[in-house]
Image (cartoon, rainbow, N blue to C red):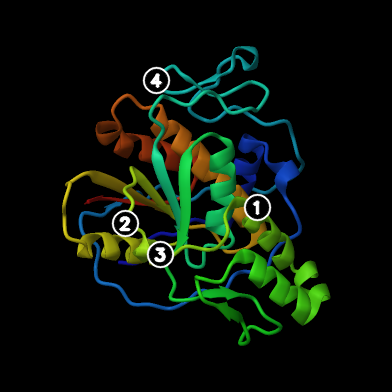
Amino acid sequence: MRRPRADAGDAGRLLLQSGCAAALRPPLAGVALSAGSVRPRRACRRFTSPPLHFRIVDFRPPLPPFWSRGSAAAGWESRSGGVAVAADGAAAAMPSSPLRVAVVCSSNQNRSMEAHNILSKRGFSVRSFGTGTHVKLPGPAPDKPNVYDFKTTYDQMYNDLLRKDKELYTQNGILHMLDRNKRIKPRPERFQNCKDLFDLILTCEERVYDQVVEDLNSREQETCQPVHVINVDIQDNHEEATLGAFLICELCQCIQHTEDMENEIDELLQEFEEKSGRAFLHTVCFY
C-alpha cells in the first residue's frame, strides 16, 4: 500500500502559526536528487491523519505553537510546563542536555540547511547531512544539473556558479542559498560517512528516510543507544524549505520538553500530525 504524503496546501496554516512570513524569499528551483535503491524498513510506525488544506490569504501576527494557547504575555508554555518560545519570538532557554539533532536531505543544500540554520538559532545541538552520492544543484536545463563532490566547499560552488552564469543563479536563488550555507559550515556532509551519535534524526523525504534507516541498520551495534528517525515530506524549493524548517523546529521543541521522550514520542507525533495536517514516518534504530 502506498504511503501517504504531506500535501503542500497545509503550508499556509503552518506559516500563520510560526510567524515565518518575513523569512520568505523568492522561490528557489528544486535541488536535483540522486537515485538509489534501499532495502525495506523495520519497525516503522505510520501516522495517517487526513491531510488538511489551507490557503495563505494574508500575513498575520504569529500564533502560539499548537501545544499551548496560554497568554502571550506569560510566554508560550510547552507540554511539560517549560517555556518553548518566548512571547517576543525569541528562543527560550534550552535544558541542560539539549537533544542531539541531525537533519538530512539529499544534497545538504536547501531543506536540511534551512532547518540547520533555524534550529541552531534556537539553541539546538544540530548537524545537517545529505545522503546522495554527489551534490546536485539546478543547472541551465533540467537534464543539465551542476554536480559536485561532497568535498567541494559551498564557497567553491558559489564561485563556480558565479563564473558560469551570475544572472541565472542569482535569479533562481542558488547563489543566495550557497551564501547562506557557507555562513553555517564550510561544506556539505554525507550522512553515511558520519559516525557521531544522535538522539533524533529528521529526514525531509521518504527516500532519504529509507537511506538513513538502511545505513543505521547496516552498522554493527555497539552501544545499543536508541535513535529516533522521523520523516516529514518537504518539497525541494525555497518556500517549502522555510515552512518545513519551522515545522521541524516546533517538533524538536515539543520533543525536547517532554518528560519521557521514549514513551511520549508516538503520542506527540500523532497529536502533531493532527494539528499540522502532515503525515510522519517514525522508527527507532540502535547504535
| Type of amino acid under label 3 | Val
| Type of amino acid under label 2 | Lys
In front: mark 2 or mark 3? 2
Q: Residue at (71%, 45%) from the top-left corner?
A: 23
Mark toward the start of the polypeptide (3 vs 1): 1
| Type of amino acid under label 1 | Arg
Mark toward the start of the polypeptide (2 vs 3): 2
| Type of amino acid under label 4 | Ser
Mark toward the start of the polypeptide (4 vs 2): 4
- Per the image, the residue denoted by label 4 is 80
Gap between marks 3 and 1 measured at Cα: 25 Å
Left or right: 183, with 244 as reference point: right
- Per the image, the residue denoted by label 1 is 183
Gap between marks 2 and 3 measured at Cα: 17 Å
Q: Where is residue 139 in the image (x, y as percent from the top left)?
A: 67, 80
Numbered tag placed on residue 195 in the rendering: 2
Pick out the residue farthest to the right: 167
Q: Where is residue 212 in the image (x, y as percent from the top left)?
A: 34, 61
- Per the image, the residue denoted by label 3 is 208
